Image (spheres, rainbow, N blue to C red):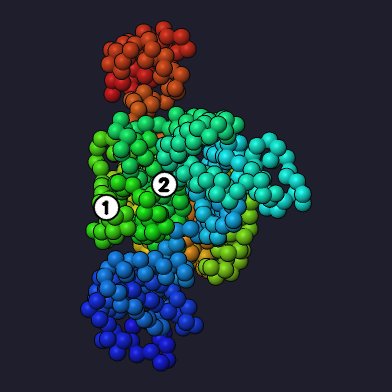
């Protein structure tokens, strides 16, 4: 049962009453806040699973159940009705533990206002009144689209008329049809709006066909001025179509490619739209992985919410998926019903479809990298905020002005090294970085012994009060409870007391404290967690770079490197003169001494070393 319950709610009785029918269930907190909405094929089985094995729950579900004090449910006639109801409830209430598609306000959209004479506008919040088109990964492409529309499709430009009794300059230059002065009929204006909608939906071929019919009618009516404007509009759209890349020779191909890329904090999903064999659009989305949400859960939730918002006429014949879905058969059945004809879900492994999926993944990765760059800029602009948040979250006794992070790197126990990365006031202090060759664990993979050694060596220097080795405000160990125990044991042996120290386990970004078995989880979108991830990743980079350098040096090591007095220049001269180690070994001391830059003493040392 949850850790706390509503005083008037009987969980045992409520679980016993659950029906063997499909439906939607809702979880509530003590203050009656809706925490989570879920769907179920069989309500009794699904809801009871939350209570049967608490220890086996995923971290996100475990965190949810600690706050649940009651639940209720709504029975539906089918799984598909449950899927639709779940979406509507999530969209209406935006529960804390549900994954929300449009919650980041990151990407720009083009909006078409809900007015008698609609106008276009730019927004980052596509949840208000009106119709929205996008999102756009790059604002440049969005403004280029707007430029074409405003030049050739005369929609209203201003929120309010500039003059009471005459139109403004936009009417004079042909970029507005003058609805403020009733210079266009509602029917004529509505036709232009429909054309703009087709253009923004990527249905350029349908638009061209419509414009061609309009031109024909205008010519037959001897309205040559209107026919000329429609011709210019037709040519502008045709130019846009010509720039779209053709991926299939078959003009009937209609596909969406849904690709994903993710890091520990977010999931970037890109939808590529193929219509009539051409790539007509790329729509990026970003979902924050809050409350220990996995990328796969975010991907499933995205697909359900994204296609709920799509009009039936806009659905493709085929959706190419990056990952299998949890309820893929149900999802496909619902799409078929919504569309009124069959829609195929595929998971290509080769061919043009796989190439398009790889293109989608590339675009998703680019979207993710842009978000990461924005995070880094935000953190650099206000590192003090992240540090204060970290001090509060970890209950640190002092402000963590100096943080140190340690990581171990080796290859099957060989060339084991450790890194010490230092952040001062929230930014990398590269002059203070240190690296260690590990001796105690050389030859066998033992991260615990290696961590014990590096912490012992580092804090022994602090005890000796060596310059540059002052004690940090926070020590971060890259790893789990085992690595942390080794580090704290090393501190105990040295008699170091009250040193704040934690470990950060990468899989779920769990934070462990000495002596505590249960981890602490920070919100995925918190600046404090981002700072910990940044220093951990930097320690890992610094350690693995050092390890690879030693490994490469060992791979190119020769017997000449062990001879006193033979540096890189003399080694190069020997190899250049003789060509190989065997030829150098066959040479006499006199032949060695004859080389420029060598003398009898050096030559004799080389000869003796090679003939021992």
Q: Residue at x 24, y 76 (%)?
A: 21
Q: Do we see residue 19 in this rendering?
A: yes
Q: Nearer the viewer, residue 233 or 4?
A: 233
Q: Nearer the viewer, residue 213 or 446?
A: 213
Mark 1 against mark 2, which lies toward the viewer? 1
Q: Label 2's element? A: strand
Residue receiving disc 2: 270
In the displayed structure, would residue 21 be above or below residue 129?
below
In the displayed structure, would residue 359 be above or below residue 466?
above
In the displayed structure, would residue 126 be above or below residue 212?
below
Residue receiving disc 1: 341
- Specify the quadrant of the image occupied by residue 13: bottom left
10 Å crowding of disc 1: few (<14), some (14-19), many (20+): few
Position in image of residue 227 (x %, y %): 55, 32
Q: Residue furthest front?
A: 221
Q: Residue at x 39, y 83 (%)?
A: 70
Q: Nearer the viewer, residue 240 or 70?
A: 240
């Amino acid at each position: 049962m949850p850790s706390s319950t509503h005083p008037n709610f009987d969980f045992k009785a409520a679980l016993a009453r659950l029906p063997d029918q499909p439906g939607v269930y809702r979880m509530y907190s003590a203050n009656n806040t809706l925490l989570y909405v879920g769907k179920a094929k069989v309500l009794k089985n699904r809801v009871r699973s939350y209570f049967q094995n608490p220890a086996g729950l995923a971290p996100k579900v475990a965190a949810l159940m600690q706050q649940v004090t009651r639940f209720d449910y709504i029975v539906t006639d089918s799984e598909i009705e449950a899927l639709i109801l779940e979406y509507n409830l999530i969209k209406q209430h935006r529960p804390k533990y549900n994954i929300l598609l449009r919650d980041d306000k990151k990407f720009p959209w083009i909006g078409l206002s809900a007015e008698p004479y609609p106008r276009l506008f730019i927004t980052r919040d596509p949840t208000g009144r009106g119709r929205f088109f996008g999102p756009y990964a790059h604002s440049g492409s969005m403004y280029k689209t707007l430029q074409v529309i405003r030049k050739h499709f005369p929609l209203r430009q201003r929120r309010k008329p500039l003059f009471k009794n005459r139109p403004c300059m936009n009417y004079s230059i042909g970029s507005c049809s003058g609805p403020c002065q009733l210079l266009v009929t509602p029917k004529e204006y509505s036709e232009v709006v429909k054309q703009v909608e087709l253009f923004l939906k990527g249905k350029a071929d349908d638009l061209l066909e419509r414009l061609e019919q309009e031109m024909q009618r205008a010519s037959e009516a001897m309205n040559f001025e209107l026919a000329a404007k429609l011709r210019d509009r037709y040519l502008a759209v045709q130019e846009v179509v010509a720039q779209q890349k053709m991926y299939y020779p078959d003009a009937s191909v209609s596909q969406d490619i849904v690709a994903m890329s993710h890091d520990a904090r977010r999931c970037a999903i890109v939808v590529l739209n193929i219509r009539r064999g051409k790539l007509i659009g790329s729509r990026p989305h970003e979902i924050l992985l809050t409350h220990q949400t996995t990328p796969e859960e975010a991907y499933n939730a995205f697909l359900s919410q994204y296609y709920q918002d799509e009009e039936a006429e806009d659905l493709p014949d085929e959706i190419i998926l990056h990952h299998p879905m949890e309820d893929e058969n149900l999802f496909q059945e619902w799409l078929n019903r919504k569309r009124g004809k069959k829609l195929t879900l595929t998971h290509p492994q080769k061919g043009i479809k796989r190439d398009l999926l790889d293109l989608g993944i590339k675009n998703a990765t680019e979207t993710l990298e842009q978000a990461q760059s924005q995070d880094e800029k935000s953190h650099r602009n206000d590192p003090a905020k992240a540090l204060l948040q970290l001090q509060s979250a970890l209950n640190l006794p002092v402000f963590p002005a100096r943080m140190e992070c340690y990581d171990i790197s080796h290859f099957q126990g060989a060339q084991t090294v450790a890194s010490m990365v230092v952040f001062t006031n929230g930014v990398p202090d590269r002059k203070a970085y240190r690296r260690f060759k590990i001796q105690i664990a050389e030859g066998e993979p033992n991260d615990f012994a290696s961590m014990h050694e590096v912490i012992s060596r580092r804090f022994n220097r602090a005890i000796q009060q060596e310059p540059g080795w002052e004690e940090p405000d926070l020590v971060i160990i890259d790893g789990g409870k085992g690595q942390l125990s080794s580090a704290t044991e090393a501190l105990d042996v040295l008699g170091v007391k009250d040193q704040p120290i934690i470990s950060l386990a990468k899989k779920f970004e769990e934070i462990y404290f000495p002596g505590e078995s249960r981890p602490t989880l920070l919100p995925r979108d918190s600046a404090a967690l981002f700072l910990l991830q940044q220093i951990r990743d930097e320690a890992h980079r610094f350690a693995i770079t050092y390890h690879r350098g030693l490994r490469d040096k060992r791979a190119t090591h020769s017997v000449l490197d062990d001879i006193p007095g033979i540096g890189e220049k003399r080694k190069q001269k020997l190899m250049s003169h003789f060509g190989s180690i065997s030829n150098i070994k066959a040479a006499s001391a006199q032949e060695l001494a004859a080389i420029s830059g060598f003398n009898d003493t050096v030559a004799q040392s080389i000869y003796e070393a090679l003939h021992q």
